[in-house]
Image (tube, rainbow, N blue to C red):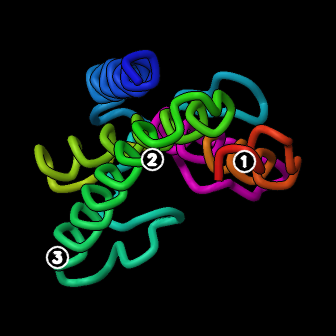
Amino acid sequence: MLRWLLIAAAVVILDQATKYAAVAMLADRPPLEVTPFFNLLLVYNRGAAFSFLAGAGGWQRELFTGIAIVASVWIVYLLRRYPQQSLFCLALSLVLGGAIGNVIDRLSIGAVVDFLDFHAFGWHWPAFNVADSAITCGAALLIWDGLRGSPQHEKNT
């Protein structure tokens, strides 16, 4: 189980380091164009994915923090229960690291720092961060792991 927790810790460290750099580099500045389809910009997201509930009265901070903490406890339980399922545990580790990275932001500054902005033809994907990327990749791996129906799953469930 230690390797899975180390992967989650690495995601948290990378996430927090990049957010620190983004705040230091982008505060009070216009978006920085990196390529014709990618900018760096500083956004404080008080909501969830795609700024869901960002405009709510502030109660959403506790809700999203609570959900992330409960999910993290459940993920640690699953990591302990199924340590031999490598793809499943890798996916959970990515989700765990991303959830913890965003919880740190919510608890320390009351919002999640987003800074990656992809766009094309005047349309911008909502800004995101390393933690969001880890959660998304972990979720995709969980779907893939569930769909592949390996004998290892059948043996261990």
> In the image, residue 126 lies at what x, y percent?
58, 56
Q: Which residue corresponds to the image point at 80% horizontal and 47% vertical from the top-left?
A: 144
Which residue position holds label 3? 58
Which residue position holds label 2? 78
Q: Is residue 50 shown in magenta?
A: no
Q: Amino acid at mark 2?
A: Leu
User: Callout 1 environment at 10 Å: few (<14), some (14 to 19), or many (20+)?
Assistant: few
Which residue position holds label 1? 140
Q: Is residue 136 shown in magenta?
A: yes
Location of residue 97 by image quarter:
top left
Of badges 1 and 3, the one in the foreground is: 1
Q: Amino acid at mark 3?
A: Gly
Residues at marks 3 and 2, CA–CA distance in whole angstroms = 31 Å
Q: Residue furthest front?
A: 155
Looking at the image, can residue 41 be seen?
A: no
Secondary structure beneath label 1:
helix
Relative depth, front residue between 4 and 115 = 4
State the quadrant of the N terminus.
top left
Q: Which residues are magenta?
A: 115-137
Instruction: Kindly indicate whether the residue at mark 2 contacts the one at mark 3 (C-beta within 8 angstroms).
Output: no
Relative depth, front residue between 36 and 66 = 66
Q: Amino acid at mark 1?
A: Ala
Q: Is residue 3 above or below residue 137?
A: above
